[in-house]
Image: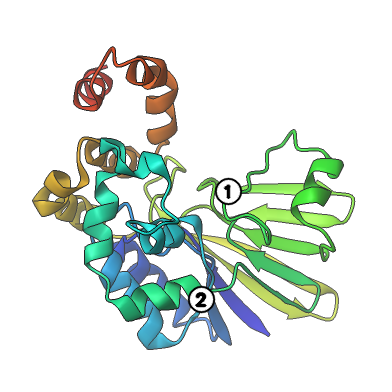
Amino acid sequence: MKLAVLTDIHGNLSALESVLEHVSGTNVDQIIVAGDAINMHPDSKACWDLIQNEGFICLRGNHERYVFDYGTPNALPEWSEERFKLLAWMQAQFSDTDLMTMRSLPLSLRFNHLLITHAGPLNDQAAIYKSSSDNELELLFPDAPKLIIRGHQHHYQEKNWAKGKIITLGSLGIPVNETGKTQYHSLELRASGWHAKHHLLPYDRTSALEKMDQTYLENAGPLGAIFRLELETARAQVMPFFKEYWKALEGDELSLQDAVRRYLAS
């Protein structure tokens, strides 16, 4: 059995098409999208439609939840803030059927001593680190098989623990590997167990950036410029931005727009 696992596409159609072209020549039995297919980049609807039309197995990520919960009683209070302006524009692009389908997606998939999930089978925003202890991991991944494949944190990481190995896949659509290349993982089930391979691929990043320079930036709000910078530099920018300016934003010392301007100028 051969699988291709794609995660954190985030609406980057150029990167997705590059990966699918590569996968088409590898004779995989199934393509699995491990959540966060949408949001943050302008071609989210096109990515969603492609995934659904091709019949790929799709898991739910936290960004699918953000989109289908936006404007409902399940929405978080902070989603009304300017930093979440993109959510309203994103949700408006999807039909009620799309949103219902997103809501029905599973958090994880298990078979043959393998778990595939977005962040964790109990929490779509679970995070693991090099310092995470076996006890902490046990709480996130109860009854874990030997191999766990996950995404969510956008950077590639392998971690061995008492029960086996956890591979955090790098983001396909927002790669923060400093190479500017997109990425995915292939898995092959052999007599000795699962064998995993990480693939780095070039893609048309210029086209992806040009799409962000169109109507996207005005609809995404000030944070759209940070999302664009993250794609352009292939380095994490969103979390460093909030780490630097969160206290000033929380205390109303700076507007979000002014904070973004300062960050971009630094």
Residue at 26% from the left image edge and 42% from the top image edge: 228
Residue at 69% from the left image edge and 49% from the top image edge: 158
Q: How far apart are marks 2 and 1 (CA)?
A: 28 Å
Could you tell me if residue 9 is visible in this image? no
Sooner in the amino-acid sequence: mark 2 or mark 1: 2
Residue at 35% from the left image edge and 44% from the top image edge: 79
Name the amino acid type tagged 2.
Answer: Ser
Name the amino acid type tagged 1.
Answer: Tyr
What number is the disc on residue 122? none
What number is the disc on residue 104? 2
Determine whether the residue tagged by mark 2 lies in a helix, strand or loop: helix
Which is more toward the observer, 189 or 26?
189
Determine whether the residue tagged by mark 1 lies in a helix, strand or loop: loop
What number is the disc on residue 156? 1
Work out whether 29 lies above or below 201. below
* x and y, in percent, of residue 101 in the image: 43, 78
Is the image coloured rainbow, by chain, by secondary structure, or in one colour?
A: rainbow
Which is more toward the observer, 216 or 170?
216
Q: Looking at the rendering, which quadrant does residue 254 occupy?
A: top left
* x and y, in percent, of residue 146 in the image: 83, 64
Q: How many neighbours does mark 2 have within 10 angstroms: few (below 14), some (14-19), or many (20 or more)? A: few
Q: Looking at the rendering, which quadrant does residue 96 occupy?
A: bottom left
Work out whether 32 lies above or below 252. below
* x and y, in percent, of residue 124 in the image: 58, 55
- Asked whether, in this view, residue 120 is left or right of residue 180, the answer is right
Question: In this rendering, which labeled residue sits more in front, label 2 or label 1?
Answer: 2
In which quadrant of the rendered image does the N terminus lie?
Answer: bottom right
Which is more toward the observer, 80 or 212?
80
